[in-house]
Amino acid sequence: MQLKALDLFAGCGGLSFGLDEAGIDVVLANEADAWAADTYEYNHPDTHMLRGDVRSLLRADLRALRGEIDLVAGGPPCQGFSLAGRRQFGEIPFQNTLVEAYLNVVAEVRPRLVLMENVQGFRTAQLRPGVRALPYTIERLKDLGYDPAVLSLQAADFGVPSLRARVFVVAVLGAMPFDPTPVPQFGEGRVQPYRNCLEAISDLPLLAAGQGVDGQVAYTAPAINAYQRTMRIGSAGVTNHVAMRHTPRLVERFRTIPPGSSSYRSVEGVTVYKSNNQRLVGDVPSLCITANFQSNYIHPQQHRNLTAREAARLMSFPDRYVFRGKRTLMSKALLDKEGRSDEANLSQYNQIGNAVPPLLARALGERLVALSDACRTQRVLVA
């Protein structure tokens, strides 16, 4: 019997896409951001989207899903747990309360399986002063009758051509039948070597700064490896392939940056903005694609920052996956200042950087299907 899932904090749909590829039917999704929800609905037309804050979902509606939903999945927003965010300054943003909201949904729906995703900082972060996020999550799941396991996974180990370390909590209602960790297939000494940056994007149309269109354009070069051929399935070309506008001076600066180096300003030996404009190395996996990657990385061979499509390829989204909303967006502070707060949605770049890489999600989904089968067998034997 096919598992049915609810995807919370679904974003643009990377987790749902991978679960679907693993044979799980994602029948419901929830997302508060308008542009991310637009992207999700465009690419998942058979999934019913519940727009709005997860905390606005009614308990009665959630309880009605008992027996209908086998898996509650999702990743509560991670900004409050990332070591790169405000946490390093001792701030605990409101997003941390959304972990509790996620667990409240689990308590009402009572699925057989639970999957929660977050950044590595989730291991040591606090939901609020004195309450650590991961221990709270584990204890709450145990109190609800679940047997949880904590997994630390690297996306590159599962065929994603970029580095992305994440924490997953997998839980089953009852006893965990076996270790839920998917077996890595890529990397040194494994079935296949890591996929690298140019392996993922070298066939995409060449662009200079400011070139490209958001709509679909035809491929200009053949696919030269299995990954590129897989990415092209179901698509006659590429969308969301627009290069950022750079001044001639910046383009010339990019020309001088070799692979693995970056553009930075140095004052008395102290590096400032060291994360900006790092030239990716073509023959290794990309550095982690973050929510603000638009100025982080330079193409390994072309003298410009990455396009949304190149980042999507590095995250293992196929070319048929179309991203909605604006490509980039000015800061929320500036929008607020100009009285345009209603425009503060997630850009295409934000959506891609926030997503769970589909290939990693697929590996987890296949493991969840196996867990479900094993649990079903256990119940039959006990009966």
Image: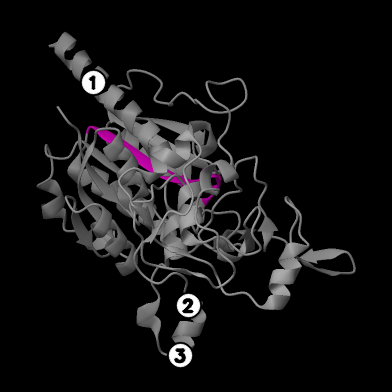
Q: Residue at x 34, y 42 (%)?
A: 233
Amino acid found under the numbered disc labelled 2: Lys
Q: Which mark is residue 332?
A: 2
- Residue 139: x percent and y percent? 39, 37
Residue 68 at what x, y percent from top left?
Answer: 12, 39
Q: Magenta stretch containing residue 114, yes or no?
A: yes
361 sits left or right of 186 in the view: left
In the image, 223 versus 293, the foreground residue is 223
SS class, disc 2:
helix
Q: Quadrant of residue 339?
A: bottom left
Q: Residue at position x 34%, y 58% from top?
A: 322
Q: Residue at x 60, y 66 (%)?
A: 295
Q: CA distance from mark 1 to mark 2?
A: 46 Å
Task: Specify the amino acid type for callout 3.
Answer: Glu
Chain-order first, disc 3 or disc 1 = 3
Span colored in magenta:
112-125
- Which of pointers 1 and 2 lies earlier in the amino acid sequence? 2
Asked whether residue 126 appears in the rendered view, the answer is: yes
Screen quadrant of the N terminus: top left
The residue furthest right is: 268
Secondary structure beneath dot 1 equals helix
Residue that badge 1 annotates:
373
Count of numbered labels shown in the rendering? 3
Q: Earlier in the sequence, mark 3 or mark 2?
A: 2
Counting from the top left corner in percent of width and height, residue 313 is at 47, 49
Left or right, 96 with reference to 142: right
Task: Point out which mark residue 338 bears.
Answer: 3
User: Up-down: is 254 above or below 111?
Assistant: below
